Amino acid sequence: MKRIKSIWLLMLVIAISLMSVACNSTETAPNSTESTTEPVTQLSGKVVVDGSGTVYPLMAHIAEEYMVNEQPDVSVEVGRVGSSAGFKKFVVGELDLSDASRAMKTSEMESFVASGYSENDVLEIKIALDGLTIVINNDNTWAKEMTKDEIINMYLSGFYKENDQVLWSDIRAEWPSEEIKFYGPNENHGTFEFFYEVILGKKEMVKTANLEQEYSTLVDLVSRDKNAIAFFGFGYYVNNKDKIQAVKVDFGNGPVEPTLNTIGEDLAYAGFTRPVFTYVNLKFAKEKPQVLDFAKYVVSANGATKLAGENGFAPLPASVYNSYLEVLQGLE
């Protein structure tokens, strides 16, 4: 009987010892993990971005990825009021970042400085390349290919008709004798300014052009009018290819279709290629950690480098984005 009690006592001691070892292992495991894992800084607050409607899809996608995968407690608000309207808000300190489909003007920088900032308080980031795209209705079977000069001249006031009621047959005699319905973004957009200043050489646009604020409205108008023609960024075309078609443009060496393989400053669609930008208020980036962190994400491998192509833009070389990242890292 005593022997049986001794055996049970021995088994009890062994069981208690095993439980003690298990408990010690459980307690030390988290400490071991904590010593080897670097804690991630969780940020909060708001980042306000507005400006270009052309850049909007790309920046909104970057913001979404940032909030989901990086900083869920940071709210990145992205608007699309237009490049010019965005700069009006940016220069008086209403925005952390201002998207633009054209470069900041000297007058806008002067307004920025007049608001109490320095020229060194803004960082211009060339975020990607866009191809200005000329679009027509899907039922248009005659104007699928046009020369650069034909596109420019048809949009110039008084070039074909004093009253600007231009017919397709004015462009080429074999085309229909039907009036062309001109469309485009309004003066709030950098795309309008690029078209007016660079493509038209600051010459007056046809008075019959219907200029709209919303790009979705332009897509709808062209899709419903057989005689319509419009211009806007490649991204809005590529996301609506079921509703409209792009004109192949002949810059002198044959018609070129806008694609991510032809859009580029040294590529076949160079004649209608332009850079698009975002501008960072560096004073705010120094004061608000979430603004600096988001700006760095924009030029990171997970930002414009990865997402530009998905939104209809040609990404820039990694070395360009890295140069911006170095500037932003220098603010830390």
Image: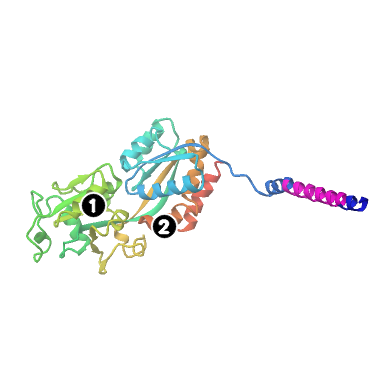
Picture quarter with the C terminus = top right
Percent x, y of residue 31: 71, 45
Q: Is residue 7 visible to the viewer in this orientation of the structure?
A: yes
Which residues, given as a range, are shown in magenta?
Answer: 8-26
Secondary structure mainly formed by the magenta segment: helix
Q: Determine contact: label 2, label 1, CB under 8 Å.
A: no
Q: Residue at x 75, y 46 (%)?
A: 23
- Residue 219, which numbered label? 1
Residue at image coords 27%, 41%: 188
- The three-letter amino acid code for the residue at tag 1 is Val
User: Few, some or many C-alpha atoms within 10 Å of disc 1 (few <14, some 14-19, many ≥20)?
Assistant: many
Q: Is residue 191 magenta?
A: no
**Residue type of the residue flagged with mark 2:** Pro
Task: Answer whether residue 110 is visible to the viewer in this image.
Answer: no
Is residue 50 shown above or below 310? above
SS for dot 2: loop
* Left or right of 327 on screen, residue 20: right
Residue at point 40%, 54% (across, down): 128
